[in-house]
Image (cartoon, rainbow, N blue to C red):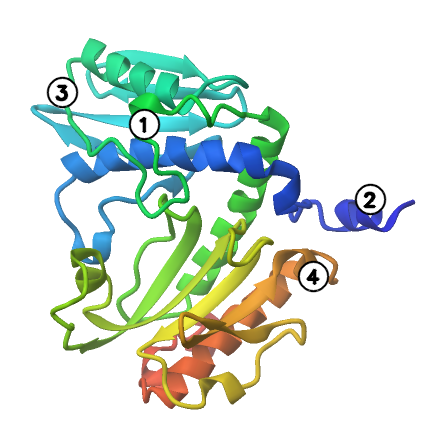
Amino acid sequence: MAKAETTAAKNPDFPPLPLKDWEPTKDTLILYFQIIGKIRLMLMPRRNHWWNVTLYVTSRGLSTGPIPYKFYTFEIDFDFIEHQLVLRTSTGATESIALQDGLSVSNFYTSVMKALKVLGIEVAILAKPYDNKSKIPFAEDYTHATYNPEQVHRYWRVLVTVDQVLKEFSGRFYGKICPVHLYWHHMDLTVTRFSGKSLPVPIEKSVVEKDAYSHEVISFGFWPGDDQVPYPAFYSYTFPSPDGIELEKLYPKQAQWADANGSPMALLNYEELRQLDNPREKLLSFLESAYIAGAQLANWPVEELRVIPLNEL
């Protein structure tokens, strides 16, 4: 049996996800995500640190969760089992759009807006990509039209596993912590811990950065790869980054510190993790070691914020 097949059989929760194999589909999917995410952005009440714009992993795909509109709510769900986008309202109305190869970003955008109108929902978004290599307005984008159902399903399977691990890790912290959620502009599934200390925000920063980094944070996440990191990986960074953090020990041994725009970022290659025995525990050890590295050097009250297991109470 080939090594990849042996690993897949040993760790079915961590299927292979090489970026080069599904990049055309990923490049289309991220633009689908941006369209749905921007709808949520326009209609959700603001929450600190942009928590109101994200998507959530579900047992079938990804969801906006309930969005308020007039006297009712609606939600938009990506179903990566039956491969459709489903729009539902609390009044019982439903619309759906088939997700299939050849569905261009333009056609997806037009179909979503038409479905919303049928449901009685009026919303206008800034209909162009945000922080993406594509600069084509959504309505004009017939270039991105690749949708491979098997590849999307595999990506979602990875998200399901990582979502559960990040939630387990979240439960170990008493301080302020965000939900485990997916930021659609980079497709990163992430969770962030806060020390509680506020930071002076430079006036020249964008409104996105001003709200995202108004307080000390240590963030953790997974993304499927991009032009800068051309492979799926787990990451963690501390902001502000304390001096000498790149000298701190990370676990497992495959993890390393890398430069990210002038600051150290902890990285763990997804493919290397899935080759290990018990990758769930190894991933938890990575998250914990990256947290301790940043929290101790930044003088967070580590013991005060640590959730005590019930058997230690």
Q: Residue at x 40, y 70 (%)?
A: 261
Q: Is residue 42 above or below residue 176?
A: above
Mark 1 or 2, nearer chain start: 2
Residue 89 appears in the picture as rendered: yes
Q: Which residue is mark 3?
A: 122
Front position in the image: 263 or 171? 263
Cα distance in 3D space between marks 2 and 3: 48 Å
Mark 2 or 3, nearer chain start: 2
Cα distance in 3D space between marks 4 and 3: 46 Å
Q: Amino acid at mark 1?
A: Phe
Mark 4 or 3, nearer chain start: 3
Residue closest to the far right: 1
Front position in the image: 195 or 203? 203
Mark 4 or 2, nearer chain start: 2
Residue closest to the far top: 118
Q: Is residue 245 above or below residue 257?
A: below
Q: Which residue is mark 1?
A: 138
| Of marks 2 and 3, the one in the foreground | 3
CB of mark 1 within 8 Å of CB of mark 2?
no
| Of marks 3 and 1, the one in the foreground | 1
Q: Which residue is mark 2?
A: 5
Q: Is residue 303 above or below residue 127?
A: below
Q: Point out residue 244 in the picture as x, y percentages from the top left corner.
A: 45, 90
Rate crowding at label 2 as few (under 14), some (14 to 19) or many (20 or more) other CA atoms within 10 Å: few
Q: Which residue is mark 4?
A: 272
Q: Point out residue 28 in the picture as x, y percentages from the top left corner.
A: 47, 31
